[in-house]
Structures are given as structure tokens and as C-alpha cells.
Image (spheres, rainbow, N blue to C red):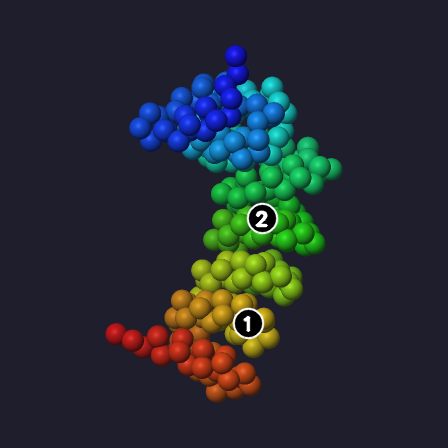
């Protein structure tokens, strides 16, 4: 007889004291459960890594490509799961919800996702697709030159939604090239308040002679007084002992 949801939640809550078995998680999982409970079960399965993937694979074969099971495939970080997700990426072009879930699940394998898919996500009008594309880009940025990375980010940096532009800045701030710093300075000048704040922090984190020079220039030339003060503050932080 199937367990009721309250009993499953109670068992999940005791996972630290009594570790969960992947077979049990597979047995209690059902598409008829509430979305929160399905997600929690799938998260537990994904965290079981090589022990979780065989059960995830069985559930996918039984129930189909459900978003929470796709998420679990990404969480388990197994090579077989990666290959399955790359296959699903091709099969789900006409199903936007599954395609998005697949891209999100593949984030840690960003370097192995086709460039066309990354570009497609970054140019998609939806916020979640763009954020997923930036996550892919974050994990492949080490393979790119500064010029290539800026080309990927050109559209999302100017997105009218702060979460997208700020996520792009976080990808860029991992690099310390002059062209990167110059683009961040542009966001300090012309971005929204939230985007400008993220760009100031990024320039401060980069902490090269180029980023310091740009902060100095911003502290002298910005028309907005609060932004000038922010540039001065971040510049001063560079020289604290």
C-alpha cells in the first residue's frame, strides 16, 4: 500500500540519522505526489550520486522525462547521466519546459554543451533560459578568450532585468583582462542601480592596475554623486592593509 505524503516527509526529515536507500526513494516516488515532495525525493536521489543514478534511470523509463527527474539526473553528476541529458537536449527542442530543465541540469557540464545551445539560451527572451545559459557559460568560460566571453555576454549584460545582467557580471568578474574591466566600468556608468552596484563590486574583486585605474576615473567623472562615492569607496578598499 502506498505511503501517504506525511509519512514520506517524516522519513525524509530523519535522513541524517537514518540514511535513505535509493531503492526506497524509487519506490515512494510517484508523479501523483505534490510537486514539493517529488522535488525533495529527486534531490535526495541526485545527492546519492552513483547509487542514485540507476534508480533515477529506472524512474525516467517508467514515468518519462519529468522535470524533477531531469533535475535529479543533473544532480547525480554521473557520466551516464550526462550522456542521457545531452540526448534529451536534442529530443526536447519542441518542449520548452523540458528543454529548460535539461539545460539547467547540464550546468556543471557547460563545456560539453554545444555552443549553439548556449547561444540559444542567452538569446532566448525568457529570464530563466538566459540564467541557465549564463550558468552553462560559467562552466565553460575557462575555454574562452576575453573577447569570446564578452561576445557571449553582450546581449545579457544589457538585459532590462537586473538578475540577468548581474549574473552576467558575475561570470565576467572571474577574469581580469582589461577589456573585461572596461565593460564592467560601462555597467557602472549606464546600468541600473543594482547592476552598477554589482559592477563596482566586480571591479573591486578583480583588483588589477586596469580595474583600479577605471575606478579612479569613475570616481572623478561619474555624474551621479552616489556612484562617484561608491567608486571612491571601492578604490580605497584596494589599498587597505
**Is residue 216 placed above or below 149 in the rendered structure?**
below
Which of the 4 quarters of the picture holds residue 163?
bottom right
Residue 193 is marked as: 1
Residue 179, image x and y in percent? 52, 70
- CA–CA distance in space, label 1 to label 2: 23 Å
Residue labelled with disc 2: 132
Q: In front: 37, or 85?
A: 37
In front of the other: 25 or 157: 25
Q: Secondary structure at mark 1?
A: helix
Q: Is residue 112 visible?
A: no
> Which residue corresponds to the image point at 49% horizontal and 33% vertical from the top-left?
40
Work out whether residue 32 can be spotted: yes
Please give the name of the residue rendered at 40% of the width and 75% of the height, measured from the top-left corner.
234
Number of marks: 2
Q: Position of residue 132 (x, y in %)?
A: 58, 48
Reply above or below: 15 against 209: above
Amino acid at each position: 500500500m502506498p505511503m501517504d505524503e506525511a509519512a514520506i516527509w517524516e522519513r525524509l526529515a530523519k535522513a541524517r540519522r537514518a540514511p535513505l536507500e535509493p531503492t526506497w526513494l524509487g519506490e515512494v516516488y510517484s508523479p501523483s505526489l505534490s510537486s514539493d515532495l517529488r522535488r525533495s525525493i529527486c534531490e535526495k536521489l541526485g545527492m546519492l550520486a552513483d547509487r542514485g543514478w540507476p534508480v533515477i534511470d529506472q524512474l525516467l523509463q517508467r514515468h518519462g522525462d519529468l522535470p524533477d527527474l531531469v533535475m535529479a539526473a543533473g544532480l547525480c553528476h554521473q557520466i551516464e547521466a550526462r550522456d542521457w541529458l545531452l540526448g534529451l537536449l536534442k529530443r526536447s527542442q519542441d518542449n520548452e519546459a523540458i528543454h529548460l530543465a535539461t539545460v539547467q541540469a547540464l550546468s556543471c557540464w557547460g563545456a560539453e554543451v554545444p555552443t549553439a545551445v548556449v547561444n540559444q539560451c542567452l538569446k532566448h527572451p525568457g529570464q530563466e533560459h538566459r540564467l541557465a545559459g549564463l550558468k552553462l557559460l560559467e562552466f565553460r568560460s575557462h575555454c574562452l578568450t576575453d573577447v569570446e566571453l564578452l561576445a557571449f555576454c553582450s546581449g545579457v549584460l544589457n538585459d532590462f532585468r537586473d538578475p540577468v545582467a548581474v549574473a552576467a557580471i558575475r561570470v565576467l568578474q572571474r577574469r581580469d583582462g582589461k577589456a573585461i574591466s572596461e565593460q564592467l566600468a560601462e555597467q557602472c556608468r549606464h546600468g541600473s542601480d543594482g547592476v552598477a552596484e554589482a559592477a563596482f563590486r566586480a571591479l573591486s574583486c578583480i583588483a588589477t592596475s586596469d580595474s583600479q585605474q577605471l575606478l579612479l576615473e569613475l570616481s572623478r567623472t561619474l555624474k551621479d554623486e552616489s556612484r562617484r562615492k561608491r567608486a571612491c569607496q571601492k578604490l580605497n578598499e584596494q589599498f587597505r592593509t
